[in-house]
């Protein structure tokens, strides 16, 4: 099966000179492009491409280093620029052996249409091509798009990519904790064990609707809580969900108090759990705006 090159496009409300600087200066480039840890330009030789070295840390003290050449700037009618490059590495850990690509800049009214396309040859024969097709190429395409949107936010909103990355980590950590809390509450005390306290609390809330043996109703609620926990992990904007969650938890806390006020004095009671979830929702809400999103970029070339 023929492999598809990586393609990403975005629109940035900025000047041509600024976008060019932030993408061509190696120190600025590594601030927003999470594919690279370090880029160093070598002394420029006359009538030869700009040579550079790059490094990418992959964890556990390991890094992949390589070399590259940037052909430079080509101006077209004053409102277009193209920069092409070639990169390669002999590092035995690298899946990429050699690759080529370009960056294209086009002025359209107040925006700069910034796009890239690149392809590469892999190491490790058929196994390398299999890993590339199933995992690595989608991952590096995702990282490219994430970096493009991070650059867009940096130039348009003035927020540095490192701060964007920290807020993104806080945001997703909050989602994972909320998902875990709801899935656990639905799975363990309700679905697996149908704990008597869960049945009793439900009977106190709805005395005329819940039979003495309310296991079935408790298990149904457990399934709904598990599904709600999974919702937190789905890829959509959750800013409104945080607000709904906070209001819902306040309502559940009040209802629990009316049903059985004695539960509020027990250790690890509903108050401590709900207050923690409310504060997590507030943290998630605060960090949910202006986050880099891969979906904001175009990933397929038209035609």
Image: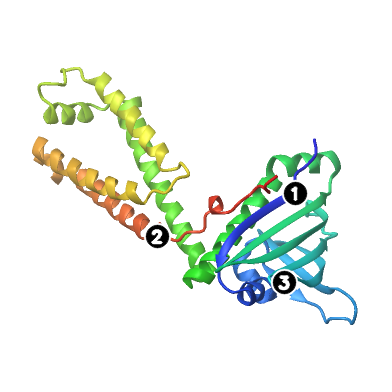
Percent x, y of residue 71: 82, 70
Mark 1 element type: loop
Which residue is disc 3 drawn over? 39
Q: Nearer the viewer, residue 258 or 224?
A: 224
| Label 1 crowd (10 A; few <14 / some 14-19 / many >=20) | some
Percent x, y of residue 211: 16, 17
Answer yes or no: is residue 268 visible: no
Mark 2 element type: loop
Please name the residue shown 33% across and 46% down the image: 241
Give the number of the mark in front: 3 or 1.
1
Q: Quadrant of residue 116?
A: bottom right
Answer yes or no: is residue 120 visible: yes
Q: Nearer the viewer, residue 64 or 6?
A: 6
Give the number of the mark in front: 2 or 1.
1
- CA–CA distance in space, label 3 to label 1: 23 Å
Which residue is disc 1 drawn over? 5
Which mark, by number, is residue 287? 2
Mark nearer the N terminus (2 vs 1): 1
């Amino acid at each position: 099966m023929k492999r598809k090159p990586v393609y990403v496009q975005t629109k940035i409300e900025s000047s041509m000179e600024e976008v060019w600087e932030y993408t061509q200066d190696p120190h600025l480039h590594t601030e927003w492009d999470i594919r690279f840890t370090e880029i160093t330009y070598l002394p420029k030789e006359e009538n030869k491409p700009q040579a550079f070295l790059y490094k990418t840390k992959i964890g556990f003290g390991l890094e992949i280093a390589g070399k590259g050449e940037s052909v430079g700037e080509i101006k077209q009618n004053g409102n277009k620029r193209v920069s092409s490059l070639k990169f390669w590495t002999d590092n035995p850990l690298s899946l990429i052996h050699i690759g080529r690509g370009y960056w294209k800049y086009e002025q359209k009214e107040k925006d700069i249409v910034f796009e890239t396309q690149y392809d590469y040859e892999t190491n490790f024969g058929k196994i390398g091509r299999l890993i590339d097709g199933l995992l690595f190429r989608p991952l590096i395409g995702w990282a490219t798009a994430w970096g493009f949107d991070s650059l867009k936010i940096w130039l348009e909103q003035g927020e540095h990519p490192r701060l964007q990355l920290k807020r993104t980590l806080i945001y997703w950590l909050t989602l994972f904790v909320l998902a875990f809390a709801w899935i656990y509450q639905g799975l363990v005390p309700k679905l697996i064990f149908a704990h008597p306290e869960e049945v009793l609390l439900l009977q106190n809330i709805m005395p005329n609707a819940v039979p003495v043996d309310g296991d079935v109703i408790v298990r149904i609620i457990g399934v709904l809580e598990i599904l709600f926990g999974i919702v937190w992990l789905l890829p959509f904007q959750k800013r409104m969900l945080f607000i709904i969650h906070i209001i819902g938890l306040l309502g559940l806390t009040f209802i629990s108090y009316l049903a059985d006020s004695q539960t509020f004095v027990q250790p690890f009671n509903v108050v401590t759990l709900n207050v923690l979830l409310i504060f997590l929702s507030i943290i998630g809400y605060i960090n949910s705006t202006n986050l880099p999103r891969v979906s904001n970029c175009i990933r397929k070339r038209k035609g």
